[in-house]
Structure formats: structure tokens, C-alpha cells
Image: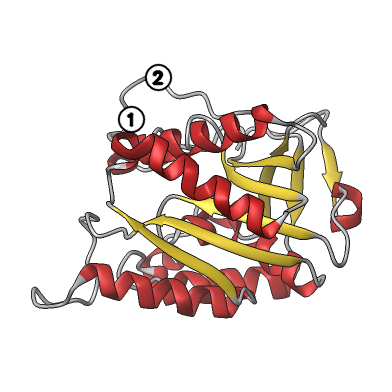
Amino acid sequence: MTKITGMQRAHTLNQIGIHKGDTMLVVMPHPDDETGFIGGFLAKCCNGEVNVRLVCVTDGAKSTLRFGLSDEDDLKEVRKKELSNALNVLGIDSFIHANFGDGEIEDHMDEISEYVENEITAFHPQFVVTLEPDGGYGHPDHIALSTIVTKLYEKDKNRFTLIYATVAPGWLADEGSRNMARKEIHPIYPNVRVYLSESDASKKVKAFKAHSSQFSVEETMRDLDEQTVDMMEHEYLFIVGK
């Protein structure tokens, strides 16, 4: 793992600039992205009494992963329930599943932009969180949604602070994930590293387990490597304008 130098090491939400009573809208492309990228951070926010609302844009129905499911199980409905269970673990009770088609964000950019804009107008968040511009590992849905949220921010930068969920410098996705990319990927370098407490990390693991059709947590924890250890101890953000 590449060591991070010159980065603010933020141990608390206050050091990041997030305080009790603040409002945060999290906009993610698929069920489980919230846990994989920033589950510990979201648990920390909820524990700190930040008012968090999550918008999951797609139904996740085109995933090729179906751990523990039969051919008869409806993956769309399974993942909707898994998301609800995972958010309950993280402490998020305000969320909406937008149900746009998995893999189809690029085909509905204007419609999704209007949808997210309406959520911003209704919720008045001080912070909006989405994935960084290369989507972490180049997933087209991730990139398209980041583009949408970024353009909404650029329309009026005074409305909210934009936070990108990113990855550790040197982090490498598995081969299957990397194969989704259509271009060379350079995830944005974080300017904040969030330290996860034991409680934050525990909730993140439990949220992973809630997404049981997508993650084999037992295998992941059994085959611990430096990246796996780090993702249970730290998460990475880029706060735009910081």
C-alpha cells in the first residue's frame, strides 16, 4: 500500500468540517456502493447525529454475483432488502431506491439529473457525497453518476459542499471490477483519510454481511491482505474546494 504523505489525517468529523445536526445527501449508483466505499464514514456520521439521507439510483439487478441465491430469486428485490438491512446497520433511516436500470445511468442522464436535483431541493443538504469522477475503478454507472452530481454542484457551488468518496492511493480493484473500465483509470487522490473506530469498522462488516448476495465476507476476511486490512481501518474522501 502506498503511504500517504501531505494529507490531513482527520480523526473526527469536526476536523473534516462536519458537525452534529448537519445534513448530508449521499448519492450512490448501486446497492452496496455505500458500504464498500464509505460504510464506516456513514456509521460515524450517524453516530455523530448528522442527518444522513441516501439515494440509491439503480436497482443493481444486473450484477453477476448471486451468493446464496437460487435461480428463482429476484435479484432486484433481494438487493433492495439487502440495502435496507445494511442502512439499518449503519444507522441511516432516510433513504430512497430510485430503481433506474442497472447499467443504464448513461442512457438516462437528464432524467437522473432532474431526480437528484429534486432531492437536493427538497432535502437542502449541506454536504452531498458521491463517487469520485473515475468511479473508483471505472464502472460506467459510477462515472456517469459522478458526472451528474458534479454538474449539479457546478451550477451553484454555494448550495452545498461536494465530497467524493475515493480510494487509497495504490489501491487496486479485483480483475473483474477493473474489466468494467473503458479507459485508463486514475482515481482522485484523497485529501482526507477517515480513521474508523472499532464500532465504525464493526458496523461496516455487518453492513457487508447484509449485502450477502454480493459479498462473501468470510472469504474476504479469511484471505486478509494489506488492502483488506486498510479498508477496515480507513476510508478516503476528497472534499472539493478544500
Residue 138: x percent and y percent? 40, 32
Residue 238 lies, in percent from the top left, at 70, 36
Q: In this rendering, would 90 be left or right of 144?
A: right
Say which residue appears at 48% left-offset and 30% top-offset.
134
Q: Badge 2 is on which residue? A: 184
Q: Could you tell me which residue is drawn at 76 percent across and 34 percent down?
A: 191
* Real-space Cα separation, disc 1 to disc 2, in angstroms: 7 Å
Three-letter code for the amino acid on which mark 2 is drawn: Glu
Q: Is residue 209 visible?
A: no
- At 40% from the left and 19% from the top, the residue drawn is 184
Residue at figure coordinates x 76%, y 60% from the top left: 23
Q: How far across and down, in percent of the image, does residue 37 sit?
A: 55, 52
Q: Residues within 10 Å of mark 1 (few under 14, many from 20)?
A: some
Residue assigned mark 1: 181
Q: Amino acid at mark 1?
A: Ala
Q: Secondary structure at mark 1?
A: loop
Q: Quadrant of residue 76?
A: bottom left
Instruction: Say the numbered circle drawn on residue 193.
Output: none
SS of the residue at dot 2?
loop
Q: Quadrant of residue 67?
A: bottom left
